[in-house]
């Protein structure tokens, strides 16, 4: 069955450093991959979408890579700030969208 | 302001008492979907709708019903709630179906005693 795995441990980093989150998947050939941010008690908010034929995508301090051979996406937050503290969800899609459980990031000032 | 509105935001009910969680979007999106979120399990899709009068099951549809009589509304119905339906529920909509950016509501936290 399809499986999507994100960093099982929460990520604690110092302000200004780069946070790197992983999203691995098995038994799946997604056409695209999305990343969302979720704050406590709020609904997820869309950040980025990357398609299977794209290797990398950037948006401001965010960078996403998509390696269909390794079946992995990496999500980077550069020059991290305390305001980046949240849970980040990856989602894989073809005809429907399936979500990972998320990774919680805490950025210390 | 573009938004997806869910009601109620919080609800405590008892086993077997029918309830409806409403969802409304003001973006004229054709695609709408319901998810439940449980610790460690992520968001799991309950039902989705590609357009008016077109609905289909997601990954965990048992115990739920939906309807899509108007484009903007997509209510989630629990005919006979049970404690295993205690969860955080999210409605979402998208202009480009599941391939597009999903806009989520603020969530409805349901407790079934």
Image (spheres, rainbow, N blue to C red):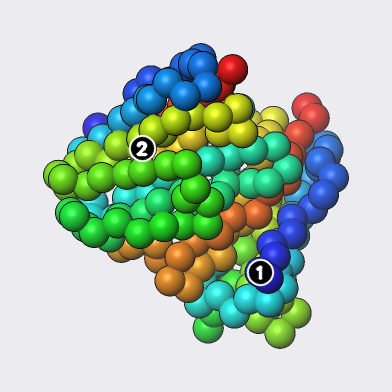
- Determine if residue A96 is in view: yes
Q: Quadrant of the C terminus of chain B?
A: top right
User: Could you tell me which quadrant the N terminus of chain B lies in?
Assistant: top left
Q: Which residue position holds label 1?
A: A2
Chain letter of mark 1 equals: A
Q: Is residue B70 above or below residue A63?
A: above
Residue at figure coordinates x 81%, y 41% from the top left: A10
Q: Residue at x 17, y 54 (%)?
A: B52
Q: Position of residue A67 (x, y in %)?
A: 68, 78
Callouts 2 and 1 on one subunit: no
Name the residue beneath numbered marker 2. Answer: B76
Residue A19 % position (x, y)? 76, 49
Which chain's residue wears label 2? B
Q: Considering depth in this image, is B79 or A30 the residue closer to the camera?
A: B79
State which quadrant residue A96 falls in. Answer: bottom left
Q: Is residue B55 left or right of residue B58?
A: left
Q: Which of these two is toward me, B113 or B91?
A: B113
x and y percentages locating residue A35 in the rendered image: 56, 55
Q: In the displayed structure, does residue B11 sit left or right of residue A21?
A: left
**Crowd rating for badge 2 (residues with CA inside 10 Å; few <14, some 14–19, many 20+):** many
Instruction: Determine the image quadrant of residue A109.
Output: top right
State the CA–CA distance, disc 2 to disc 1.
26 Å
Taking the spot 40% from the left edge, 62% from the top edge, the residue there is: B98
Q: Secondary structure at mark 1?
A: loop
- Seen in the picture, residue B47 relative to A33 is either above or below; the reply is above
Residue B108 badge: none
Image position, residue B8 (x, y; %): 38, 20
Asked if B33 appears above or below A28 in the picture, the reply is above
């Amino acid at each position: 069955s399809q499986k999507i795995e994100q960093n099982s441990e929460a990520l604690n980093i110092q302000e200004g450093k780069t946070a790197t989150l992983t999203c691995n998947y098995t038994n799946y050939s997604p056409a695209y991959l999305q990343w969302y941010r979720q704050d406590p008690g709020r609904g997820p908010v869309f950040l980025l979408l990357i398609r299977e034929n794209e290797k990398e995508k950037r948006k401001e301090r965010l960078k996403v890579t998509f390696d269909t051979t390794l079946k992995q996406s990496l999500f980077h937050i550069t020059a991290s700030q305390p305001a980046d503290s949240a849970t980040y969800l990856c989602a894989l899609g073809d005809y429907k969208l399936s979500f990972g459980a998320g990774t919680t990031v805490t950025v210390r000032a | 302001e573009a938004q997806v509105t869910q009601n109620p935001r919080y609800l405590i009910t008892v086993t077997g008492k029918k309830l409806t969680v409403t969802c409304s979007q003001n973006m004229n999106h054709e695609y709408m979907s319901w998810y439940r979120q449980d610790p460690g399990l992520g968001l799991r899709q309950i039902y989705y709708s590609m357009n008016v009068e077109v609905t289909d099951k997601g990954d965990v549809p048992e115990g739920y019903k939906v309807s899509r009589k108007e484009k903007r509304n997509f209510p989630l119905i629990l005919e006979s709630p049970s404690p295993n339906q205690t969860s955080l529920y999210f409605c979402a909509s998208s202009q480009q179906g599941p391939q597009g950016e999903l806009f989520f509501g603020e969530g409805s936290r349901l407790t079934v005693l």
